[in-house]
Amino acid sequence: MINLLLIIFIVSLFVCVTAIRLKTFIKAIAFQGLLLFGIFFLRLNEINTVNLVLLLLETLIFKAILIPYFLHYLIKRNKITRETEPYVSNFASLFIITFVVMTTFFLANTLKGGVFENIYFVIASITIFTGLYLIISRRKIITHVMGFIILENGVVILSLAVGVQMPMLVNLGILLDIFVTVLVLGIFAIKIGDFFKEAEVDHLNRLKD
């Protein structure tokens, strides 16, 4: 069941890479929050009530509901156009991510234990690369924020590979993820939007000390 959720998570990454509308992008991020909750719930052994509540708040509430709502707020507040406006075509992006997925699975299969023993490391690596790719291949700052959120999702998945027996360690990692995403990136996106309504990366060249 966990492997199925991880495969669906990879599919959501393809949706993010090929999304033309920001609304589709945000829905994919919200869906990833739901998948993370299911993966964590099934993966963590001997989870107690406290950890379950924290897990519910951190993944289902924040990642699946509050963060997507906040992104919608940023788009409306700053009157950002609804296109993702990539530097690279969607077909080329799809090809690149497909190549990365296939290469990562191939390399994992050559390691001791095979793909299924290293599945969390594989999915985390693909997710982190996809987040980085979205950051460098999109014009708008709001899509850079979304790319960073996806990158953070990869870091959270990576924590499962080392923190399966320590749920509180995973919880602390997710809390740090939420802090960085909502506080730092939120303030950054709002302030930039006050000056540049379209909030494109190219406009940052006009900023001075």
Image: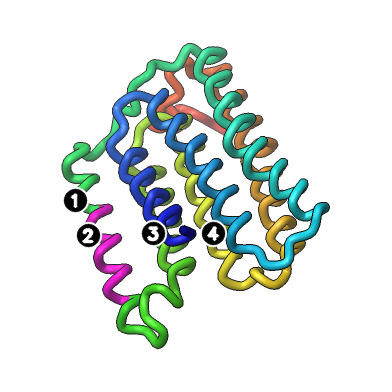
Secondary structure found at label 2: helix
> Label 4 is placed on what type of residue?
Ile
Residue mark closest to the camera, 1 vs 4: 4
Q: Which residue, as the protein is rendered here, is positioned at the far bottom? A: 112
Task: Say left or right for 27 vs 111.
Answer: right
Q: Is residue 7 above or below residue 189?
A: below
Q: Quadrant of residue 4?
A: bottom left
**Place of residue 133 in the rendered image (x, y in percent of width and height, measured from the top left):** 36, 49
Secondary structure found at label 1: helix
Q: Quadrant of residue 110?
A: bottom left
Please report the residue visible at 38 percent of the width from the left and 59 percent of the height from the top.
126
Position of the C terminus by quadrant:
top right
Per the model, the C-alpha gap separating discs 2 and 4 is 21 Å
**Can the viewer see residue 127 in this picture?**
no
> Label 3 is placed on what type of residue?
Ile
**Place of residue 151 in the rendered image (x, y in percent of width and height, measured from the top left):** 49, 51
- Residue 99 is tagged as 2
Is residue 174 shown in magenta? no
Q: Which residue bears the numbered disc 1?
A: 95
Of labels 1 and 3, earlier in sequence is 1
Asked if marks 1 and 4 touch (Cβ < 8 Å), the reply is no
Q: Is residue 61 above or below residue 23?
A: below
